[in-house]
């Protein structure tokens, strides 16, 4: 039911990931929405981009608090993303934080300005695995664990095939046990604690 009327459907699919609402509470309590932040630099030219990314590939580090970065499609800007702080912050603050983190990796970008800063939620499962399946007649494809741009298009296609009864809809992630923790309602109040723990582990690893 919506504010403008009632919608009836033979099948319903929940694909809301980091924005799963209370209307899907049984699934929401199995997900941890986490703010992810991204910046784009000003245009620095293709030659300078090629110096930073000789093969023009995307890169991700191996820390617990991960940064990922790549050239823009036109090979003129650096796109740099990750978790800015232990708590959610506005894009002005996250832009400054990510710029500082970017310059720790690429000191030669100290003089480069940020032209765009944005954010959005990703969603993690407690077992860090994607989950596709059906609960109480509701189909779902959730918990991309930070790589939804790649995964969710694929999962959407597979879910559609499952709804149609097509055997090609099967995946390795079908009907895995989708766990949660006691008393968790979908609000990840513990994230600042986890963030600081990961920061400590990353500092020790360095």
Image (cartoon, rainbow, N blue to C red):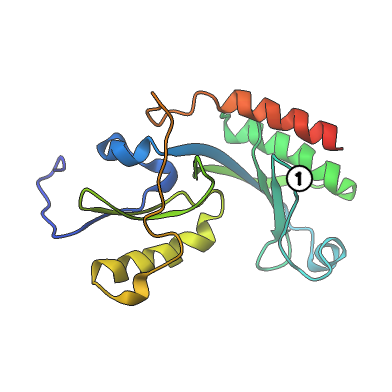
Where residue 56 sits in the image (x, y, percent)?
A: 76, 68
Residue 56 shows in the view? yes
Front in this rendered view, residue 128 or 157: 128
Where residue 139 sits in the image (x, y, percent)?
A: 28, 55
* Residue under the point 71% across and 59% down: 70
Total numbered labels = 1
Front in this rendered view, residue 172 or 64: 172
Front in this rendered view, residue 159 or 76: 159
Q: Is residue 72 above or below residue 137?
A: below
* Residue under the point 32% across and 38% down: 21
Task: From the viewer's perspective, tell me whether residue 40 is left or right of residue 45.
Answer: left
Q: Is residue 31 above or below residue 158?
A: above
**Residue lying at the far front of the rendered structure:** 177
Which quadrant of the rendered structure holds the C terminus? top right
Where residue 4 sits in the image (x, y, percent)?
A: 13, 44
Residue 87 shows in the view? no
Quarter where residue 110 is shown? top right
Which quadrant of the rendered structure holds the N terminus? top left
* Residue under the point 75% across and 50% down: 61
Q: Secondary structure at mark 1?
A: loop
Q: Is residue 201 above or below residue 19?
A: above
Where residue 53 sits in the image (x, y, percent)?
A: 81, 64
Q: Residues within 10 Å of mark 1 (few under 14, many from 20)?
A: some
Q: Which residue is mark 1?
A: 113
């Amino acid at each position: 039911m919506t504010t403008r009327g009632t919608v009836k459907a033979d099948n319903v699919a929940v694909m809301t990931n980091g924005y799963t609402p209370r209307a899907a509470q049984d699934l929401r309590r199995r997900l941890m929405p986490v703010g992810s932040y991204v910046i784009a630099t000003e245009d620095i030219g293709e030659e300078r981009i090629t110096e930073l990314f000789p093969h023009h590939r995307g890169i991700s580090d191996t820390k617990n608090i991960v940064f990922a970065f790549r050239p823009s499609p036109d090979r003129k800007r650096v796109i740099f993303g990750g978790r800015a702080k232990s708590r959610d912050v506005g894009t002005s603050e996250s832009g400054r934080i990510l710029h500082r983190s970017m310059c720790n990796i690429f000191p030669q970008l100290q003089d480069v300005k940020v032209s765009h800063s944005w954010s959005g939620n990703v969603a993690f499962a407690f077992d860090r695995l994607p989950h596709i399946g059906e609960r109480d007649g509701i189909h779902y494809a959730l918990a991309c664990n930070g790589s939804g741009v790649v995964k969710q298009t694929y999962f959407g296609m597979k879910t559609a095939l499952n709804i149609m009864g097509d055997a090609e809809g099967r995946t390795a992630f079908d009907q895995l046990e989708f766990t949660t923790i006691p008393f968790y309602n979908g609000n990840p109040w513990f994230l600042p604690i986890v963030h600081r723990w990961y920061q400590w582990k990353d500092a020790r690893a360095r």
